[in-house]
DNA sequence: CACGAACCTTTGACATTTCAAATATCTGCT
DNA sequence: AGCAGATATTTGAAATGTCAAAGGTTCGTG
């Protein structure tokens, strides 16, 4: 009944829109958005299926994994691009699951530092390996040179966007 | 105290990670993700500030805007890449606000078709114009040729990802 | 026509998300 | 010491998000 190819084609047409009369920047944006959504959802599915974890949890643990001494919640918030209040809940649940530990340093009692536990490190290491594989798999049909080129070009986009944020640039 | 440039640089370093030893596909993915997050958040802020609307609402209305006869909720779900259950609530709220109308066609009573109201069309038209401008603004520092190139290259990535989804490809 | 399979949407349980307001703590200045 | 302002986190309300299960409805076939 339903074939994979038909689905893919539909998705592309659907998200892009039947008409091609939009400005190039808009077209690019819509394609960036649908592509990251597509890949994100696949990663989400696999994280859930294979590790019982969510993508935000994975992201958060990734930051803690490379800072063995832990990070303040505010730092975590910036690095994961997630709001403060959100980090609170994420860390709470990860702590309940035993993957993260919270400590308030003596020097400054306003601060909470989150750190991976042993179990957290073990779990993350496994997830990270799988995660990297999934990405290589999903990008298998993209020429390595294109991967590099894209990395650099998207950097340009990012810088441009960063320089045109409403709150930034001056003040 | 806090300068915009410093923020931007930090963000880049932070999200990318201090070490550059990951596989190119992973690096590209992280950069795609952080860039779309950055732009999404800016669009979200502006939609909220200028129109009191949310990004998912905008996305949903965009689909309805180009299908004047309306769409079934299942279709909406596919096009917005959002789950069925989620669409239910989104449409409910938009209906409560008077921007969308729900109808069950006579032919098939399982189906619900969502349609923009007059107010919905008016609002969306205004948002769409602004939205397109924001994107041109945020991508102002990207060479038009690069915009085109990116559009096409990201298409390759998308196709590749689509062909390597867990559920797709065969069966 | 009846019944089981397929289809479409909703519901319910949770997790994530944002924003704004509230808490708590620290710092600098007088 | 003491207080205003800056910092850091939590909380609360509302929206969005997923998934799985439940509700209806329609369809094909016996």
Image: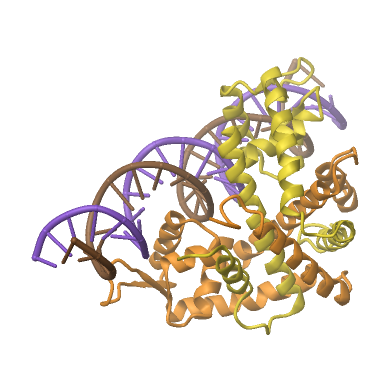
Chain colours: A yellow, B orange, C purple, D brown
Q: Residue at x 77, y 35 (%)?
A: A75
Q: Is residue C26 left or right of residue A34?
A: right
Task: Judge whether C15 appears above or below A102 on screen.
Answer: below
* Residue toward you, A170 or A56: A56
Q: Is residue C5 left or right of residue B138?
A: left
Q: Residue at x 86, y 51 (%)?
A: B8
Task: Judge whether B110 appears above or below B85 on screen.
Answer: below
Q: Residue A137 in the image: state x and y as whole percent.
A: 73, 49
* Residue toward you, B159 or A1: A1
The answer to whether residue B109 is seen in the rendering is no
Q: Residue C29 in the image: state x and y as whole percent.
A: 87, 32
Q: Quadrant of residue B32?
A: bottom right
Q: Residue A77 in the image: state x and y as whole percent.
A: 71, 39
In the rendered image, the quadrant that contains the C terminus of chain A is bottom right
* Residue toward you, A156 or B4: A156
The answer to whether residue B68 is seen in the rendering is yes
Q: Is residue C13 left or right of residue A103?
A: left
Q: Residue B126 in the image: state x and y as whole percent.
A: 59, 78
């Amino acid at each position: 009944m339903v074939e994979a190819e038909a689905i893919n084609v539909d998705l592309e047409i659907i998200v892009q829109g039947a008409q091609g009369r939009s400005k190039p920047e808009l077209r690019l944006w819509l394609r960036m958005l649908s592509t990251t959504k597509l890949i994100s959802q696949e990663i989400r599915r696999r994280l859930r299926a294979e590790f019982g974890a969510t993508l935000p949890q994975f992201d958060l643990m990734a930051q803690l994994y490379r800072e063995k001494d832990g990070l303040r919640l505010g730092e975590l918030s910036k690095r994961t691009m997630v709001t403060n209040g959100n980090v609170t809940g994420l860390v709470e649940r990860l702590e309940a699951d035993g993957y993260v530990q919270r400590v308030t340093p003596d020097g400054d009692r306003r601060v909470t530092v989150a750190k991976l536990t042993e179990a957290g490190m073990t779990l993350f290491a496994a997830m990270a390996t799988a995660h990297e594989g999934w990405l290589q798999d999903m990008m298998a049909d993209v020429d390595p040179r294109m991967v590099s080129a894209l990395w650099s070009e998207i950097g340009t986009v990012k810088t441009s966007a960063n320089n045109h944020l409403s709150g930034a640039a001056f003040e």
